[in-house]
Every structure is written in C-alpha cells, then in structure tokens.
Amino acid sequence: MTGAKEPDPSSRRLMVGEELRHARERADLTQQALGERLFVSGSYVGQMEAGTRRILPDMAQRLDEALGTAGFFTRHAAKANQSKHPEHFAEAAEAEVLAIEIRQYESLLIPGLLQTPAYARAVFLAYQPTAPQETIDNLVAARMERTRLLTDPTKPLLWTVLDEAALRRKIGGPSVMAEALSHITDLARRRRVIVQVVPFSAGAHAALDGPFKLMYFLDAPPLSFVEAPSTGQLTDDAATVARHELSYDLLRADALSPRQSLVLIESVAEDYAHEDHAPGV
C-alpha cells in the first residue's frame, strides 16, 4: 500500500498562508499591525497570506513569536519553500502561478513561458555546458511545467515585449529558432498571448539596462522581478513597481504593433526554416 501523496509546495504554501491569516485574525491584528511587529509592510504580510511570498526561515520564527503559534510556521516553512526552480528565481516562478496578469520585457532571449523544449535545452546547455544530462533534463522539465500556465484559455493575461535581438540570436541553430518563433506566432494567433517587438530601428529605449517582469494579483499588490546572473530581486516596493510600469509603457510605445510584430516574427521564422533546408556550401 502506498503512502498518502505529499502536497506540492505551492499547495502547501497556500495552506500555510491561510493559516497565517487565521492566526493574525485570532490575534486581532491587521496586516499593517502585524507588519509593524515584523518590520515589513502590511502588503508583504498580505502576500505571505496569499502565497505569493515565501515565508523564509527567519520570518517563520518571527511569526511564531509574534503570533504565539508554538513553532507552526517554523515547522512548515521549509517544506512550503521546496522548489524545482533555481533559488534566486523560485519565488518569482511561484508568483506566476497566482498572477492574473503578467507583463514582461526580454532583451536577448525568448522568455521562459514562451519557450519550446529544444530552445530551453539549448539555453541551459549554454549556461551549464558540463552539467550531467539528468540535470539538464530536470531543468527543461521544470521550465515546460511553467508553460502549462498557458493551457488555460483566458488567464493569466500574458503581454510580452521582445527586443528584436531575441529573434535574431540563433539559439540552438536555425531549426530550433524556426520552431521557437513559430510557437510564439501560434500562441499569438490563437489570441492566448500579446507579443510586441521593439525593432532595432527604434534605437535607444527605456529598458536598455535589461529585462524585467511585472505580475498582478486579485488579492495582493503587484510585484516586479528583475533577474541577473544567478540572482534576482522580487519586490512590491510601490516606487520600483511604478518605475517599471512606466518603462513598460514606454517600451510598448516604441514597439511595433501586435499585428506588425507578428508579421516580423513569422518572417524571421521563415528565414530560419529556409536556412535549415538550404543545401550545404
């Protein structure tokens, strides 16, 4: 007889967040009042309750002390924080699952939610050229699991702005690129995603310093995520989020329209397909 199946970390995190809400209400504290005791904002408490923020070990201990929960959060935080994703990205990946809208800008790569397995594999091999095959396979599987968000016909709303460089950088060779770009155009034509391209002809634009992502939720403040090599910053700081929102709006103004962008992406995909079938020189 097999044992009971362990809940996945995201489900466990929602359960712990719900318990946090009950414990806070039993203590007759608002989110803001509890946040003051923990030296965080009230919105941060709300995000922990909604499951969009991890409860890290030091925070779990502070919650137990503030709410008198006899070690409940200390015991459960570790299991709730388990993830298939790299540590610096795990919290952002988990927030994606709960978002009702995602806006993102990518400068050099097709974003993870839009990648094909072959494209993702080429990216991971470039990052970790000596990694065992099993490691690469697991990374690809985790990335493809993220893309299941798009199997829902209506949510989240995904609006992506790509730099033209992401289309032109030949990741994995022409056949991989042809497939990857065709996948994007298929999603766009099925009206599952909105994609715009900032062409090289736009010159300087508002996000030359790199990619970023904005996520919006029904019951929590929006989050902004900025990633760099082996590190990432997820924040709900209102000023930072507002600055990234302005950058995103400026990018959309510089970008081709969704229809024009689709034409460009299809054209580049066709070029890759012809290159792949061209006779050798």
Image: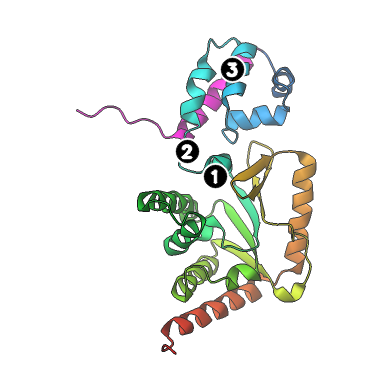
User: What amino acid type should be assigned to the residue bearing mark 1?
Assistant: Ala
Asked if residue 270 is among those painted magenta in the image, a careful observer would answer no
Q: Nearer the viewer, residue 130 or 185?
A: 130
Predominant secondary structure, magenta span: helix
Residue drawn at point x = 46 percent, y = 57 percent: 129
Q: Which residue is mark 2?
A: 83
Mark number displayed over residue 58: none
Instruction: Please tell me whether mark 1 sits on a helix, a strand or a loop.
Output: helix
Residue at the front extreme of this rendering: 130
Could you tell me if the residues under marks 2 and 3 are in contact, i.e. CB atoms within 8 Å? Answer: no
Mark found first going from the N terminus, 2 or 3? 3
**Disc with the residue nearer the chain's start (1 vs 3):** 3
> Helix, strand or loop at disc 2?
loop
Dot 3 amino acid type: Gln
- Mark 1 surroundings: few (<14), some (14-19) or many (≥20) residues within 10 A: some
Query: Which stretch did the figure color magenta?
Result: 1-27
Residue at x 56%, y 78% (from the top left corner): 268
What x and y, as percent, mark residue 218? 63, 40
Q: Which residue is mark 3?
A: 61
Q: Is residue 173 left or right of residue 132?
A: right
x and y, in percent, of residue 279 in the image: 41, 89
Query: Which residue is the extreme one toward the left?
Result: 1
The residue depicted at 51 percent of the width and 31 percent of the height is: 14
Q: State how the image is colored.
A: rainbow
- In reply to whether residue 12 is colored magenta, the answer given is yes
User: What is the spatial separation of the Cα atoms under label 1 and label 3, in whole angstroms?
Assistant: 24 Å
Can you tell which mark lies on residue 93?
A: 1
178 to the left or right of 106: left
Disc 2, disc 1: CB below 8 Å? yes
